[in-house]
């Protein structure tokens, strides 16, 4: 059974930093791309970032240069390092395991979400 | 980026109704479209991928159709568990984009 567990959300001041983590089980993590998707309160879903199995990274324009996605295959953990946080980054952040090939991914398995609040 | 537009934004319906949600892409995406259901406080769940393929375990009352720029999600006979918000997502390009959502509420 595939399981995705995201964590690390917190209240942080504007301009601050935070690192989210995502641990998984039930599949071979090192062979799989992973993704972060976020949802602002009362709003829709927004793709944030994807990292391929080989470590290639992709970002939404809204977070490029501020967020860094990474993975530690030995710890079976995905990370999202967020810096220069803005109030508009306030959202529930979901870690998701995509399905598909060649970056044509839909998101088959999702974590429960972790809340990041950016406020003074 | 490819823009995804869903209609309607809100849909009021009754148990047993047949309902259809439409999703339009700003440019052709082939069949690279997924549909998700999300209930309040929960993660999204994929219902359909590649426009019309039913995800394992999803009831057969859900179906998807379309290609290019216009897609539909149909629920053939609405059940109480189906009242939720539905999102489409294109994955033709890696800048993945979602529709704004359709809230399906009880009439």
Image: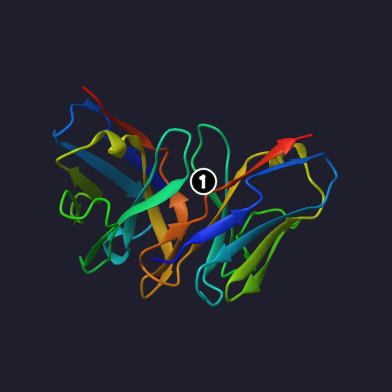
Residue nearer the viewer, B107 or A33:
B107
Which residue is pictured at 30% across the width and 66% down the height?
A31
- The furthest residue to the top: A120
Instruction: Check the picture and name the quadrant holding the C terminus of chain A.
Output: top left
Q: Is residue A41 visible?
A: yes
Q: Colour scheme of this structure image? A: rainbow
Name the subunit of mark 1.
Answer: B
Q: Is residue A51 left or right of residue A113?
A: left
Residue nearer the viewer, A58 or B59:
A58
Q: Is residue A1 visible?
A: no
Which residue is pictured at 52% across the width and 49% down the height?
B100
Relative to A53, say whether B13 is above or below: above
Residue A81 appears at what percent x and percent y?
A: 18, 45
Residue B83 appears at what percent x and percent y?
A: 69, 39
Residue named by callout 1: B44
Element at badge 1?
loop
Residue A91 appears at what percent x and percent y?
A: 35, 36
Residue A96 appears at what percent x and percent y?
A: 39, 51
Relative to B28, say whether A2 is above or below: above
């Amino acid at each position: 059974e595939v399981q995705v567990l995201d964590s690390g959300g917190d209240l942080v001041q504007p301009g601050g930093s935070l690192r989210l983590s995502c641990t998984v089980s039930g599949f071979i993590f090192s062979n799989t791309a992973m993704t972060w998707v976020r949802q602002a309160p009362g709003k829709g879903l927004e793709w944030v970032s994807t990292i391929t199995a080989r470590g290639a990274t992709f970002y939404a324009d809204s977070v490029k240069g501020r967020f860094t996605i990474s993975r530690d295959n030995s710890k079976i953990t995905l990370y999202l390092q967020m810096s220069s946080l803005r109030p508009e980054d306030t959202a529930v952040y979901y870690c998701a395991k995509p399905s598909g090939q060649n970056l044509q991914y839909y998101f088959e398995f999702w974590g429960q979400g972790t809340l990041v609040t950016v406020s003074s | 980026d490819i823009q995804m537009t869903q209609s309607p934004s809100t849909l009021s319906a009754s148990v047993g109704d047949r309902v259809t949600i439409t999703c339009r892409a700003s440019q052709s995406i082939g069949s690279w479209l997924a549909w998700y259901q999300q209930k309040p406080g929960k993660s999204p769940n994929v219902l359909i991928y590649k426009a019309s393929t039913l995800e394992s375990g999803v009831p057969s009352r859900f179906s998807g159709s379309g290609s290019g720029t216009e897609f539909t999600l149909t629920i053939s006979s609405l059940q109480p568990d189906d009242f939720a918000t539905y999102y489409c997502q294109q994955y033709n390009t890696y800048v993945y984009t979602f529709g704004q959502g359709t809230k399906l509420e009880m009439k």
